[in-house]
Amino acid sequence: MRHLACRVQYKGTRYLGFQRQSRGPTIQGVLEACLESLIGERVTVLGAGRTDAGVHALGQVVSFKTRSTIPIARFPQAMNSRLPEDICVMSAWEVPASFHPVRSALEKEYVYLIWNGLHPSCILGDFTWHVRGTLDVERMRRAAAILTGRHDFRAFRNEGSSARTTVRELRALTVEVEAPDPLCPPGHRLIRITARADGFLYNMMRVIVGTLVEVGRGKLPEDLSEALRTGDRTLTGPTAPARGLFLMRVIYPPELDLDITVDV
């Protein structure tokens, strides 16, 4: 029995998230159907991140076990020939039997994109949260600095998590304004929020983004220490829409030799 891992990209717009369910199409369900068609086996695909409906990925990592003898170098092309255009396999590796896409991971990185300006973008609409009104990026950066580090993030999650602990180490949280681009008319800009942590609670990234936006609007204080100290969800912002969120990469120990660098 072989144990394989793949790096997968997908546009999550028309899917009900990663995890298989009966109500509609999911990333896991499509990947499993693709593999059954390709190798003639019913397999279970495990993912590093159970992304929600509408969330995208550039660096999702999945694994599955198979008896197939297809050479590992041919798996991406063979799968892509059977996958819809909004899901693609970028690379594949043989991994140890003990590998697990979640438990073996050291950290994950997410990116959230905000289209900030009066008018929406019909090009970027599926990939950004349109926020009207000028956001104070410097205030957002100072608030992000408060959140960086090891904290109890129970105020930055939504109900539905089965996590045993709400303590996480947020190793990096940055707020950047993308360089001027022809897509950005005067008075409009693309804001990129990047977070890297040893793990994320349910909706944690989206709540962090919603909170930083409220800070940028002047509706919440820059100093979010009280929210961290008390765990009071009312002291944080709304959950940002799913469509602006990307699972960028999952980082594993060097000895696994998984080249999952994503350049954007």
Image: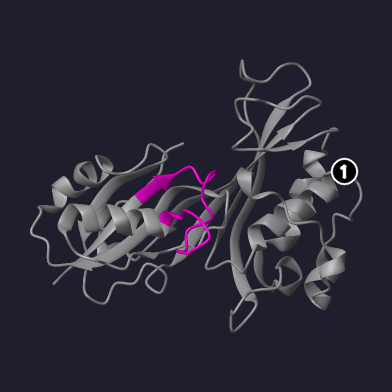
* Side of 134 relative to 62 (left or right): right
Whether the magenta-drawn stretch holds residue 167 is answered as no
Residue in view at x 74 percent, y 47 percent: 141
| Position of the N terminus by quadrant | bottom left
* Side of 112 relative to 156 (left or right): left
The reply to whether residue 21 is in sight is yes
Q: Is residue 231 above or below residue 112?
A: below
The quadrant where residue 217 appears: top right
Whether the magenta-drawn stretch holds residue 21 is answered as yes
Q: Position of residue 178 (x, y in %)?
A: 63, 30
Residue in view at x 59 percent, y 79 percent: 162
The quadrant where residue 94 appears: bottom left
Please name whichever residue, 77 or 110, is drawn nearer the observer in this view of the structure: 77
Using a 10 Å C-alpha cutoff, classify the residue at mark 1 as few (fewer than 14 neighbours), some (14 to 19) or many (20 or more): some
Q: Position of residue 257 (x, y in %)?
A: 25, 59
- Residue with the mark numbered 1: 217
Q: Mark 1: which secondary structure?
A: loop
Badge 1 amino acid:
Arg
Number of numbered discs visible in the structure rendering: 1
Magenta stretch bounds: 8-27
Please name whichever residue, 41 or 247, is drawn nearer the observer in this view of the structure: 41
